[in-house]
Amino acid sequence: MLEGPAVVFRGAVSFLTLLILSRILGKTQISQLTYFEYIVGITVGSITSSMTVDLNIRPLSAWIGLVTWILLAAILEYVTIKWRWAAKILKGEPTMVVAEGQILENNLRVMRYEIDDILGLLRNKGVFDLSDIKIAMLETNGDLSIQKWPNLRPLTPQDIGMAKGAEQLTMELIYEGEIMEHNLHMLRLDRDWLETQLSSRDLTMDEVAYAALDSTGKIYVDLYRDRFTIPIDISDYKGPG
């Protein structure tokens, strides 16, 4: 087989294999991957690229290796979901690194982290004062979960005794100038109601690029004709008006 068509064929096979097998692995996001899962992803990518462009590698052997790695990852994922004790061994557990404002150095040493690493993660969370923290946990994916002292947490409606109604999704009414008839029907509204709402704002359908109705009954409207423009170089932006 000629070199060009061979690379195209191998690339297509690799692409389809990854597409099919990635469905088996589920929808875990990059930010949720453990360190081991991250390494598996890099290895699978390396095998795929070698299978595609390295014509000295037998394609069947590379393909079998690729499938083997992905299936083993899928089996590992199944095992960790099925048995909690296996998840503790294979994926590890969250580790407390700060308790009542104090850094737990022994736990850091076990995780092979330095104090500066934790301080950096805290700053990324907008926390610059260790005394604000009641508990901080280092998750298995390397992210840091923080619980502040009760007096430093944001107020909720429950804290001030305010009842809060059930929230609903914001529903699109107009998208790229097209009326979302299905959404209007779900809301038990119609085109006449929508036109009336726009008329009250001295607007016509042709002027609206996007419109949506939130859970409070408020309508958001975005027009094709913007009241101000933003330059391509955002550093030149001086604000509306």
Image: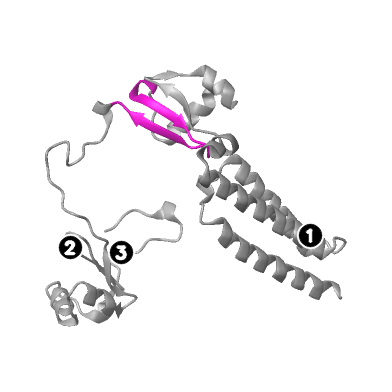
In which quadrant is the N terminus drawn? bottom right
* Mark 3 or 1, closer to the camera: 1
How far apart are the two marked residues, 1 and 2, measured between alpha carbons? 57 Å
* Three-letter code for the amino acid on which mark 1 is drawn: Ala
- Depth order, front residue of 173/168: 168
Residue ID at (41%, 61%)? 231
Q: Position of residue 38 (x, y in %)?
A: 61, 45
Residue 110 visible in the snapshot: yes
In which quadrant is the C terminus drawn? bottom left
Residue 113 visible in the snapshot: no
Q: What stretch is highlighted in magenta?
A: 130-149
How far apart are the two marked residues, 3 and 1, measured between alpha carbons? 56 Å
User: Residue 148: which numbered mark, if any?
Assistant: none
Residue ID at (20%, 80%)? 204
- Is residue 91 covered in magenta? no
Q: Do the residues labelled 3 and 1 touch (CB within 8 Å)?
A: no
Circle 2 is placed at which residue position?
Answer: 218
Kind of element beneath mark 1: helix
Kind of element beneath mark 3: loop
User: Residue 62: which numbered mark, if any?
Assistant: 1
Q: Which colour scheme is used?
A: one colour
